[in-house]
Image (cartoon, grey):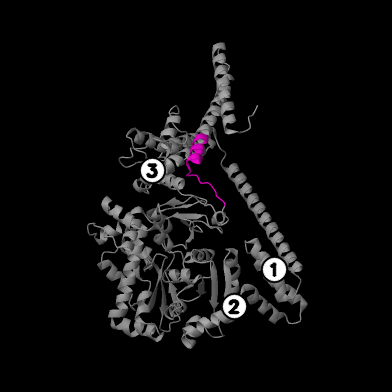
Amino acid sequence: MRIPEETVERIRQASDILEVINDFVSLKKRGSNYIACCPFHNEKTPSFNVNPVRQIYKCFGCGKAGDAVRFVMDIENIGYGEALRYLAKKYGVEIEEQEQTPEELLRQNERESLLIALNFAKTYFQELMQKTDEGKSIGLSYFRERGFTNPTIDAFELGYSLDQWDGLLQEGTKRGYNPDMLEKAGLILRKEAEGGGKAKTFDRFRGRVMFPIHNVSGRVIAFGARILKTDKNQPKYLNSPETTVYHKSQVLYGIYQAKQAIRQEDVCFLTEGYTDVISLHQAGIKNVVASSGTSLTTEQIRLIARFTPNVTILYDGDAAGIKAALRGLDMVLEEGLNLRLLLLPDGEDPDSYVHKVGADAFKAYIKQHSQDFIDFKASRWLTEAGDDPLKRAEGISDVCASITRIPDLLKRQTLSQRVAQVFHVSEQSVISEINRLLRKQQDQGRKEEERQQQRAEANNRHTASQQPATTDDINALLNSLSDADTDLPEITIPDAPFEAAPSFKVTRTPIAHQEEECIRLLMNYGAIELEPEITLCDYILEELKDIEEFQSSSNNAMLSLYRKSYQRKVILTAENFLDQLTPEQSELHKTAVTLCIQKYKISDGWAKHEIYVPTEEEIHILAKSAYQNILRIKKMLAEQRMIQIQQQMREPANSSDDADRLMLEFMNMKRVDVEISRLLGTVISG
């Protein structure tokens, strides 16, 4: 279904990019903008920048950029229409669309269809628990016995699946859901009959309490299910299989319910089980998540890092809990997070212990008994080592090995002092051990790279010996590359102040950077008057009148828009591009966002010390920037033309007149190049 343009505009106007991004990443104010570690690639230093005035974001690390709609598209991996519906729901904007039948819903893309099917299953399981005798007597009674209240049950959308073979299948079919889609969502199973008979189709979850698993934005993407009766042929817990929308290594149970509390408390408590999360949440400790039935993964740690750099692991105090804590310890450190660990009293888990002592006592226990990873490891090694010096040395080496995982050099140096204090050894011996382990890791990394390279070369030799390339193969490859270069995407730009722009590919050459700087100045300061009645746009377009087009296709597309709009007495601004270019016009939109967001900010420390730092917006600096930019473009064009002339002069077919003409043009270009170099104050080459 198409969303009317006026509705799209209402959604855009209602959306606040800070609120939208804050649902997924913790933003920190820096000057007039906000920063964070980018959610689209792994980084330790924030390069993700949000401009609330222009309602755009830009990552200077991976290049992702756009507005609120584009962010939702990228972070949720969904289409343009679905991102608009997400924002419309968030901000209460009514979308006037024709009512969709179940068949129309299922014809949408597979990801959206899977989410719709999973949401149907969630609601179905909730209704079964609240409205059927079996659901009330078994499912609801179980949650009541665990002490869960109605608000808690509603917050986590808990439910129950009847002990029937095909209850969900029948209900889903009756409501128009395709069994194939229910199977892809992991809700039903299909078993081929022996002897070529008809396949049997039945529900995956039967006679179990249901724990919906939500993604960061709150949509149900999978289920965890616990059986309540004793059946040796059935696993106690059963989880959804991996699907297009569910990858268990990338999901944390409870992250949707916990994300705001994690941001506010600036720490995330990490547990192992569903009921641990729910019980702590109900007790008022809401900044808690679980690793969703898997060993802790790097992706899960990075998900936590979106909201806080501080993690406290809460595991059971038995041998399995200690093993799990030690297994996740190095992974958390490797991602640059600050880690503390807490083992509960033997025989207790977070769920049982918070019920036993209450929320206040539980919080106090965390505060008193949580340890940093050095104390956590050292206490176990020192207990085991006793008076054995070799065991003691082994413990020091083990703690140092964890420190080598930390990417921050300053943190490593500080923690080496702590290790020396705890084990009563010299700091230099600890530093020497850390350096030895780091060198060992580097050596192992180099050896592994060499092995991979050798394997790759062996595979290439094997492939080459089996399939020798022919002249026809090479010609076909060259032709395909040539075709690819001319098969450019169509770019459509809305009506005035825009006209249709040429299609293009992004080209990154030295002159393209100067062209881009020219567009940046036009976009951000074009309407500013350098002199009375002479704007920056007047100056730049006048200076560029002898240059027919820019060499970079994307820059030339924007220059064409400026020239055509200028003829209509309109000077385009950044807002024209950001408001009128839709996310489908990805290259122009991304370029516009990139050019109008500032990467750096002048430190407030200069003002504190009463040191004045001029800014780019000041007229004399702006005029100088534009002047130098035009000079650099013309200098590069002159240098390119000189190279072309030299190539033409080498051609044997040139007559003496042609040679003289080319030599004269070369000398003129050389004089232009020398004069511009003088004006720029650069070194003139001989």
Residue drawn where x is 55% and y is 50% of the image:
612
Residue underneath mark 1: 416
Residue underneath mark 3: 573
Residue type indicated by callout 1: Ser
Furthest residue toward front: 610
Q: State whether residue 536 is above or below residue 345.
A: above
Give the spatial CA distance, label 1 vs label 3.
Answer: 54 Å
**What element does badge 3 sit on?**
loop
Magenta stretch contains residue 150? no
The tag earlier along the polypeptide, 1 or 2, is 2
Residue type indicated by callout 2: Ile
The tag earlier along the polypeptide, 1 or 3, is 1
Residue type indicated by callout 3: Thr
Give the spatial CA distance, label 3 vs label 2.
Answer: 59 Å
Residue drawn where x is 52% and y is 55% of the image:
47
Label 2 packing within 10 angstroms: few (<14), some (14-19), many (20+): some
Q: State whether residue 431 is above or below residue 388.
A: above
Label 3 packing within 10 angstroms: few (<14), some (14-19), many (20+): some
Q: Which residues are magenta?
A: 611-628
Residue 322: numbered disc: 2
Q: Between label 1 and label 2, give the one nearer the viewer.
A: 1
Residue 351, x across and y down, in percent = 47, 82
Using residue 675 as the reference point, say whether residue 241 is left or right of it. left
Furthest residue toward bottom: 356
**What element does badge 1 sit on?**
helix
Q: Nearer the viewer, residue 672 or 615?
A: 615
Magenta stretch contains residue 612? yes
For the C terminus, the quadrant is top right
Q: Nearer the viewer, residue 79 or 469?
A: 79
Give the spatial CA distance, label 1 vs label 2.
Answer: 23 Å
The tag earlier along the polypeptide, 3 or 2, is 2
